[in-house]
Amino acid sequence: MMDSTCLSERLEMNGEKGPVTEEIEQECKEFIENLVDRIFNNSSTIVQEDNAKFGIYSRTPEGRALFAKLVDSQRVNTKRVSEQTFYRLVQFFALCLFECNEADDFRPAKCLMNMSFTFFHYSEEVEDSTQDVITPNSDEAIDSINGGNNNAQGSPSNPKPPKVKSFLYTHLKEQPIWKCQRFWNASFFESVHHERTQQSPDGRRGHWRHMSSEEQELAEIMEENITFGQLATFLHNMMALGLSEEFTTRFLDKMGVIGNITRDQYEMLSANITSHFKAGKEPRRWSVSNLGTPIRQRLSSLMKLPSLH
């Protein structure tokens, strides 16, 4: 297998001619597939040469897209990872996000952002206030501390320390792409479009003139509710990643107008921003589909419902 210096020279020469060649693309595919497998299953085998090669391949759009896709596919196996895998993910996420920012390549960056709020490991050190503390008396704590063996040693006189969920994003807050307004705009529009497609896969919104007035009203309500739900998630991510009150409020103002959310919806999102910065704490993750029951009920009451005829 070629060394990273030779690989870098080949990619630089190729860059003068346009898209990567099929040969380089295949080499990239094989390397990243193998790397992601080792990150999740055998991360101790990763060496400095792997880091160097990934840094080079992540300069290509094919490399960035494939890495994000393969990491995303690992969710179905587990969201909880070992500490060693966790810090390998931090390392490679940081490299890929840096190159995404350099290239204005926002799609894989959005995927990695979502994954940074997905993968976690249990830690004994509280790194920020969004982490979920698992008390030693809880069943989950017993399983996590004793490796699933509830009969392992441990007593009130010798208590085990509490465990907390540590998510990837807590180590990725300094990435420059989070400060890029264009990243958030592009990612938000793509997410809203994806949700609309998921909820209306037959594309009926495109046949507006052929819809009844009731169908048009339902379509408008669906789109407004999708915008509201996506705004809730994006604003959470912005605040958790350390963006300013001015930045998040400006984003809400712009996207709220474009998405035509209701005044009540806007006021609740705005109040959440104000509360976060007034308290000086990290926001807990919240969205329409992933909340505790009381907050979900409050949000649901603000979702526009179709009028009855």
Image (cartoon, helix red, strand yellow):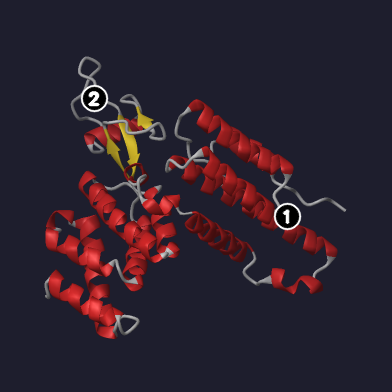
The residue that appears at 41% across and 65% down in the rendered structure is 105
Q: Is residue 292 visible?
A: yes
Quickly name the residue at label 1.
221
The residue that appears at 74% across and 74% down in the rendered structure is 207
From the viewer's perspective, is residue 156 above or below residue 220?
Answer: above
From the viewer's perspective, is residue 63 above or below residue 124?
Answer: below
Q: How many numbered marks appear?
A: 2
Q: Position of residue 97 (x, y in %)?
A: 35, 57
From the viewer's perspective, is residue 155 above or below residue 69?
Answer: above
The residue that appears at 53% across and 38% down in the rendered structure is 245
Q: Position of residue 205 (x, y in %)?
A: 71, 68
Q: Helix, strand or loop at disc 2?
A: loop
Q: Which residue is at the front of the view, 11 or 35?
A: 11
The residue that appears at 22% across and 70% down in the rendered structure is 31
Quickly name the residue at label 2.
160
Q: CA distance from mark 1 to mark 2?
A: 50 Å
Q: Which residue is at the front of the view, 103 or 206?
A: 103
Q: Position of residue 117 (x, y in %)?
A: 40, 47
Q: Is residue 297 visible?
A: no
Q: Is residue 2 left or right of residue 238?
A: left
Q: Helix, strand or loop at disc 1?
A: helix
Q: Which residue is at the front of the view, 21 or 26?
A: 21
Say which label, 1 or 2, has the lower sequence index. 2
Query: Can you say which quadrant of the picture contains the N terminus?
Result: bottom left
Q: Extreme right residue here?
A: 309
Image depth: mark 1 or mark 2 in front: 1
Amino acid carrying mark 2 in the image: Lys
Q: Quadrant of residue 154?
A: top left
Crowding at dot 1, Cα within 10 Å, few <14 / some 14-19 / many 20+, comes out as some
Q: Position of residue 36 (x, y in %)?
A: 26, 62
